[in-house]
Image (cartoon, grey):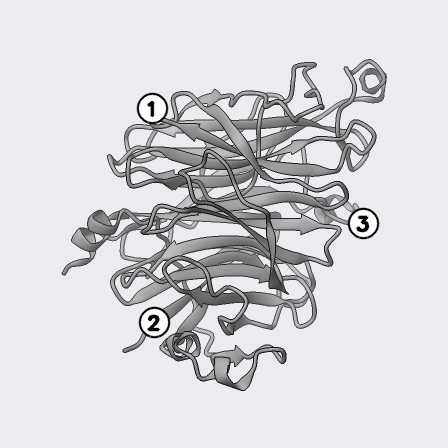
Amino acid sequence: MDRLNFIKKSSLISGLSLVNIPMIFQRITPNDIPAAARKSSALHNAQKVEKVRDFIIYEDPRFYSSFPSVINKGDGEIVVAFRRAPDRTIFGEEKTHHVDPNSYLVTVTSNDYGESWTEEPALLYAHPFGGSQDPCLLQLQDGRILCTSYGWAFVNAGGIENLRTPNFKNAGRSVFLGGYYLKSADGGETWDGPFYPPNIPPEVKYSALGNPLPAYNRGALWEGESGRLFWVVAAGDDPDNIGKTSTHLLISDDKGETWQYSCPVAEDDKASFNEASVYETPKGDLVAFLRTSGLDDQAVIARSADGGESFGPWQTMGFRGHPLQALRLPDNRVFLVYGYRHKPYGIRARILNEECTDFNTAPEIVIRRDGGSSDIGYPWSVMLDENRILVTYYFNVNNDTRHIAGTILELKG
């Protein structure tokens, strides 16, 4: 089967990168996995993955590049979207923050399955009222593309006290704008929008513009077998603790033209849940993979067995890492990738069974362990063809320039 037909058949999202940096593929078996489990089919499956190479997709010392997502459009064309902002040290500032008034959404493209890339990024979108974050691409089965994001407005001292409260502030004078999304009907050549998702019932905050905060989140959306779109969003649910969030499901039955609130995904009196990716299993369950706060960086899973009408109790997955993204492999297993922001800093993954039920026994795969600090990660993976996976992420090696990197893995057996 050629690459284009494979991509169309599986309706998967993809992408790739460059630079040969040979590394030994490593595998970690958690100490608490019993010997019998280590001999299980899950471990056998993990052994069938080999690293091909690491490489750099985009790097410029003037810019802080981060938070990528990727799609494979077919015919060799791969698009990586990411957030790019000035590296504030060029102005003599002490550090660069994750929010910035000049943070724009950009893309780089490869027309030869990642062997080469456009050197200068193309502008995807610059929000008129502030800096944008985390472009999350979803390529639909009909070829249209959605890109979700969210933003921060930078408000001068004279305006901060006049803003409608409660609101969410970060790094001094940046005030949260909430979420928005863009749509492209021509493969990303042009984009319409911004369009704003609804404010959902648990959300207590207002945007910097004084409106009820539009729904938002970082993470992969999913187009279900029926054509429905699923999006797990976050909401601030405690006016006395503005940083605390829970997660909730939005559903679109018209390819993202409109969104309807469905149900809570994960809530807790103390812990927070936010950056989330959603996945539909072959059986039809919806599975949400969630970042947490207040749980020692434990990854969390929540499951719906009724098509997204309700979710059962959330569960910790038995390992640390965030955020997570799920990719369906050709044999229906699930490649779950995540950032690891603890020493040794890097990128990790697990291969789950097709219904994602073996998350606490599936062996951990170490993709990178040479990160220069905890400021790395946010991986997003895609199939290049029937045998190769591309993992994109942002990275630094010696705590230097944040750049967009990639790793190619090959499925064996």
Closer to viewer: mark 1 or mark 2 = 1
Look at discs 3 and 1 and give the one toward the viewer: 1
Q: Is residue 78 left or right of residue 133?
A: left
Say left or right for 170 vs 314. Answer: right
Depth check, front residue: 113 or 162: 162
Residue 281 location in percent, x, y? 37, 51
Q: Give the residue type at disc 2.
A: Glu
Instruction: Check disc 1 and report its element: helix, strand or loop.
Output: loop
Q: Which residue matches tag 3?
A: 94
How many C-alpha atoms fall within 10 Å of the one at disc 2: few (<14), some, or many (≥20)? some
Q: In the image, which is nearer the foreground, mark 3 or mark 2?
A: 2
Image quarter (top left, top right, bottom left or bottom right) of the C terminus: bottom left
* Horizontal and vertical percent position of residue 63: 60, 47
Q: Secondary structure at mark 2?
A: strand
The residue that appears at 81% across and 34% down in the rendered structure is 241
Comes first in the chain, label 1 or label 2: 1
Is any part of residue 147 visible from this angle?
Answer: yes
Mark 1 closeness class: few <14, some 14–19, many ≥20 residues within 10 Å:
few
Q: Do the residues under discs 3 and 1 have CB atoms within 8 angstroms? A: no
Q: Residues at badges 1 and 2 in contact (C-beta under 8 Å)?
A: no
Residue named by callout 2: 410
- Name the residue carrying label 1: 254
Tell me which amino acid carries mark 3: Glu
Q: CA distance from mark 3 to mark 1?
A: 46 Å
Name the amino acid type tagged 1. Asp
Could you tell me which residue is drawn at 44 percent across and 40 percent down? 221
